[in-house]
Image (spheres, rainbow, N blue to C red):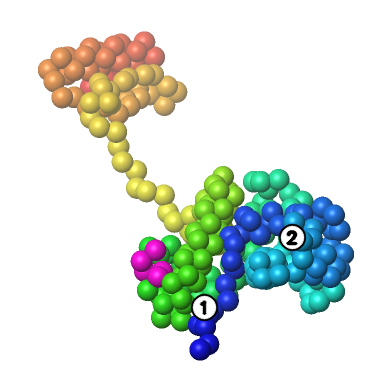
Amino acid sequence: MIKKRSPQFPVVGLAEAIDKTRLVWEQDYTSDLPRDVIAEHMGYSSLNGKSLGIIAAVAKYGLLDGRGDETHVTELAVQILAHEKGDPQRIEAVIKAASLPKLFQDINEKFDGRSPSDQALKSYLFTRGFTHTGVEGLIRSFRDTETFVQEETLDYPTNEVADTSEEEMQTREEIQTLTPPPPYSPPPAAALGVPTISMSDSGLEISGGVISSLDQFEKLMRRLKAGRAMLDEDDGSDLI
């Protein structure tokens, strides 16, 4: 009887895959290496089921590449390992690595980029031919990767300005330039007060205001009388 196997998937999350890759990179950088040497660098005594599974998982995240004796740490991995947490280059590389496993891509497409519940994920994986053991393993690596990406991108700027292209910004500026200013709205009557009166070269100037009470009317009359006096002094003519 043939034992049923689940489809291939990363047996560890991205965080552990990066840790394993670091062990190789710190000893031989990006040199081509036999897989048994890579396994030893990762802490395994030989190539066996477990070490081969880890190497395969690391490769699915794009952190290792090559075949046989020509397997090496990738530039994508170096972009993560050579930068501190929070560095934009590291964040971009982490996001890319998390999206590379084919099965993760299928899950994101199935659920429109949303994080599905474990039950929804299980139902989907069973339809893909997963065993119960495989389902548990995939969910573990998928959730571990989700959590790691969230932690790595926690302080990453995602505001609208950062995501807006130069062309979009120019279009917005053009729209703002073409949009006429709002119509003038006069201040409320209470803010205008009693009209003011002053003397200029042209004559007696009365600036705007609103009379809304008898007291304000009397103030206006006193100012008009004062204005008449100024006109009398100026040319001796009558205001009326």
Is 115 left, or right, of 48 in this rendering?
left
Q: Is residue 239 visible?
A: yes
> Is residue 119 in the magenta section?
yes
Quadrant housing the C terminus: top left
Q: Main secondary structure of the magenta part?
A: helix
Callout 2: few (<14), some (14-19), or many (20+) C-alpha neighbours within 10 Å? some
Mark 1 and mark 2 in contact (Cβ < 8 Å)?
Answer: no
Q: Position of residue 91 (x, y in %)?
A: 64, 54
* Residue at x 17%, y 18% (from the top left corner): 217
Rendered image: mark on residue 129: none
> What's drawn in magenta, residue-wise?
118-122
Q: Point out the frontmost of discs 2 and 1.
A: 2
* Residue at x 34%, y 16% (from the top left corner): 231
Is 75 left, or right, of 141 in this rendering?
right
Residue 93 quadrant = bottom right
> Mark 1 belongs to which amino acid?
Ser
Q: Which sits earlier in the primary sequence, circle 2 or circle 1?
A: 1
- Measured in 3D between alpha carbons, the distance from the residue under mark 2 to the one under mark 1, in whole angstroms, is 24 Å
Residue 117 quadrant = bottom left
> Mark 2 belongs to which amino acid?
Tyr
Residue 229 quadrant = top left
Q: Is residue 42 above or below residue 217?
A: below
Local secondary structure at mark 1: loop
Q: Which residue is mark 1?
A: 6
Q: Which residue is mark 2?
A: 44
Q: Is residue 109 visible?
A: no
